[in-house]
């Protein structure tokens, strides 16, 4: 893992995406924001990002579909879902797929910080 962790943010809501990237900087993380899963996948290489924070429902590919793609190309990348609307089945599917957390919008910065650290510690291993 890099000295300063690089967090990928994928959300089709520009205001939320930018606010989340700024919040991550306040927490001393680097971040790279993407408008959608397709842009993230085009820029992704294994090891480039230390954690992914993604919305559930986006135009085109959903967060769950993105998670399924990453299981085959970068299975160790920790994923945190953030969503304004989700069903219990969607939450369960994300967590069964290995997501570190599933948080509701609007997010609490302290809770996000705690879950990002859990994700980064999972990446570092025991």
Image: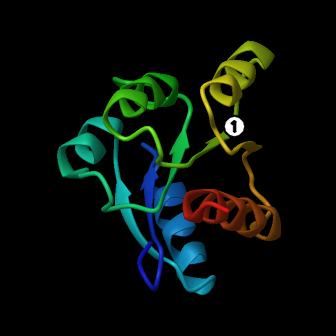
> Taking 12 as reference, is 63 above or below it?
above
Rendered residue at 61%/60% (across/down)? 125
Q: Residues within 10 Å of mark 1 (few under 14, many from 20)?
A: few
Residue 35 on image: x %, y %: 34, 47
Q: Residue at position x 68%, y 23% from top?
A: 96
Instruction: Say which of 38 and 120 sits in front.
Output: 120
Residue at 51%, 24% in the rendered image: 64
Q: Position of residue 59 (x, y in %)?
A: 38, 27
Residue 48 in the image: above or below residue 42: below
Residue 9: image x %, image y %? 45, 55
Residue position marked by numbered label 1 in the rendering? 84
Q: Is residue 93 left or right of residue 3?
A: right
In the picture, which quadrant includes the C terminus? bottom right
Question: Colour scheme used in the picture?
Answer: rainbow
| SS under mark 1 | loop
Taking the image as shown, residue 93 lies to the left or right of residue 32, namely right
């Amino acid at each position: 893992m890099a000295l300063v962790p690089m967090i990928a943010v994928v959300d089709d809501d520009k205001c939320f995406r930018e606010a989340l990237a700024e919040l991550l900087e306040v927490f001393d993380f680097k971040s790279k924001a993407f408008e959608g899963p397709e842009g993230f996948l085009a820029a992704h290489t294994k090891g480039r990002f230390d954690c992914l924070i993604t919305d559930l429902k986006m135009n085109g590919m959903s967060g769950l579909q993105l998670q399924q793609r990453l299981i085959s190309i970068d299975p160790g990348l920790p994923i945190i879902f953030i969503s304004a609307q989700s069903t219990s089945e969607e939450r369960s599917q994300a967590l069964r797929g290995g997501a570190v957390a599933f948080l509701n919008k609007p997010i609490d910065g302290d809770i996000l910080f705690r879950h990002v650290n859990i994700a980064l510690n999972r990446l570092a291993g025991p």
